[in-house]
Amino acid sequence: MNKLRVRDYFLIGFMLVLCSAMAFPMVWMAYSAMKPNRIIFTDPWALPTEFSVNTFIQAWQVGNLGRYFTNSMIVTSLTVAVILFIGSLAAYAFARLEFKGRQPLFYVFLAGLVIPAQTFVIPLFVFLRQAGLIDTYAALILPYTALGLPMAIFILHAFFATLPRDLDDAAAIDGCGLFRTYSLVIMPISKPALATIAILSAIDAWNEFLFAMLFIRDTMMRTLPIGLYTFYGYYDINYQMLFSGLTVATVPLLLFYIFFHRYIIEGLTAGALKE
């Protein structure tokens, strides 16, 4: 028993040290935003002399972060909604229905997991330009959705495949068609898997940089990762403002993850735990 307690204390201590090491960069970024550039370079580990939110307010106003924040919220929320809807429908069809070519088509979708986005940037740009979608929300939502669907289908397929077939039979006896079975029976009990997809998709869409830089040229349509370039100059960088903007961009996802992180574990392990 004593050995077990010693081991537990050791593991707890190790995890605390590991979590502290992982959290320190964000803490350092937040308190560095309250220090002048000169102090950041001469004494990077020093605490700020005063704790004030004025720097964050200034960064929000000077860097037009309010507009960029709104753009990121629109793009991220619509991307997550489309991925959840299309991904759940596709995963339901692959996991619960029988049709010709089901397995080959499923593997075609999964191939998207191993194809780097950089390989099709040029043809995608040409397509979006010819379609007149450059400098629109669709120029980001469509690629983000396409990149997020393979993972969504993969996780939801694994979850749906573990649900008892009796659920479909009972729904059919009650007069439910395929879509009603999907929407009224399968979806309500799939919240952990859906939350997992929502969190992962939101993180990817919120932080994406390459497509947002190439497909959005209008300054008023920029998302937060591109908008933070406001604090980069030709000859110098305002690190105080940059750290303030990065902190503002990090906080929403951090809070979102804190409140819903347990669903990631539940969603990824639900398929393995169900009989």
Image (cartoon, rainbow, N blue to C red):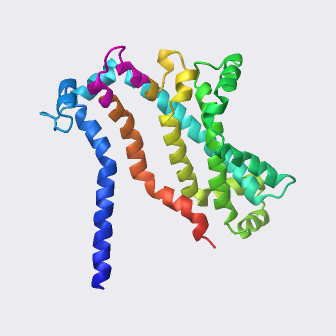
Q: How many marks?
A: 0
User: With respect to residue 64, does 140 lie above or below?
Assistant: below
Q: Nearer the viewer, residue 108 or 255?
A: 108
Q: Which residue is the extreme one toward the bottom?
A: 1
The quadrant where residue 130 appears: top right
Q: Nearer the viewer, residue 179 or 233?
A: 233
Q: Position of residue 210 (x, y in %)?
A: 54, 28
Is residue 229 shown left or right of residue 142? left
Q: Is residue 54 above or below residue 254?
A: above
Q: Quadrant of the C terminus?
A: bottom right
User: Which residue ends up furthest to the left in the rendered image?
Assistant: 49
Q: Is residue 250 above or below residue 123?
A: below
Residue 96 location in percent, x, y?
75, 59
For the point 59% across and 68% down, which residue is it?
272
Q: Position of residue 39 (x, y in %)?
A: 17, 28
Whether residue 231 appears in magenta in the rendering, the answer is: yes
Find the magenta span and give its range. Answer: 227-243
Residue occupying the point 75% across, 54% down:
94
Q: Residue at x 31, y 42 (%)?
A: 25
Quarter occupied by the N terminus? bottom left
Q: Depth check: give the residue in front, 176 or 101.
A: 101
79 is within the stretch colored magenta: no
> Seen in the image, is 275 located left or right of residue 237?
right
Residue in front for this viewpoint, 18 or 148: 18
Q: Residue at x 38, y 44 (%)?
A: 254
Choose top left, top right, bottom left or bottom right for residue 29: top left
Residue 229, image x, y percentages: 40, 22
